[in-house]
Amino acid sequence: MYIYEVQIRTRYNETDKMGVIYHANYINYYEIARTEMLRNTGIYSYSEMETAGIMMPVVEIQSKYILPAYYDENLTVRVIIKEMPTVKMTFCYEIFNEKQELLNIGTTVLAFMNSKTRRPCRPPQKLTDYLKGYFG
């Protein structure tokens, strides 16, 4: 299992009329965490994968809201990879507030796609080699 955490400070423009973080922003938080996780591996960033001819479209999103987040909170977004990627890669998320209360859980499934053919493809070998160290 591979785990990575990123800190995100909520901004005023992310709140709704009730003063809580608007629900759609959690999807953005997932993307920030996912992007930073890939960059943290030192293997590929999204832009490097796209330059190498591989795109990763989102094919599924699930999100469960447990507690609200508020303006100016420093959130911890934990992204977890529980299984080796194949033609798809599942990212699991847990979002915590500063009190370490669980606010949200979610998953996204992204597919690996050849940018020229627009057909599914295998993940980059460098990425799977890196992740193998976390899965035994």
Image (cartoon, rainbow, N blue to C red):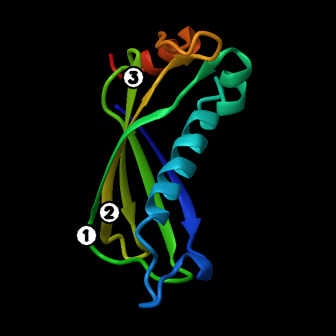
The relative height of residue 75 versus residue 38 in the rendered view (above or below) is below
Front position among marks 3 and 2? 3
Front position among marks 1 and 3? 3
The relative height of residue 37 versus residue 110 in the rendered view (above or below) is below
Residue at image point 64% right, 36% down: 39
Q: Under tag 2, what secondary structure?
A: strand
Mark 3 nearby-residue class (10 Å; few <14, some 14–19, many ≥20): many
Query: N-terminal of the two: label 1 or label 2?
Result: 1
Q: Position of residue 50 (x, y in %)?
A: 68, 24
Q: Amino acid at mark 1?
A: Ile
Label disc, if present, on residue 36 of the rendered structure? none
Q: Amino acid at mark 2?
A: Asn
Query: N-terminal of the two: label 1 or label 3?
Result: 1
Residue at image point 63% right, 17% down: 115
Q: Under tag 3, what secondary structure?
A: strand
Label disc, if present, on residue 88 of the rendered structure? 3
120 or 87, which is in the foreground? 120
Q: CA distance from mark 3 to mark 2?
A: 23 Å
**Residue position for label 1:** 66
| Residue 46 appears left or right of 95 | right
Q: CA distance from mark 1 to mark 2?
A: 5 Å
Q: Amino acid at mark 3?
A: Lys
Q: CA distance from mark 1 to mark 3?
A: 27 Å
Instruction: Classify residue 1 by image quadrant.
Output: top left
**Residue position for label 2:** 104
The relative height of residue 124 versus residue 95 in the rendered view (above or below) is above
Q: Position of residue 83 (x, y in %)?
A: 31, 25
Contact, mark 1 vs mark 2 (Cβ under 8 Å): yes
Contact, mark 1 vs mark 3 (Cβ under 8 Å): no
Q: Under tag 1, what secondary structure?
A: loop
Mark 1 nearby-residue class (10 Å; few <14, some 14–19, many ≥20): few
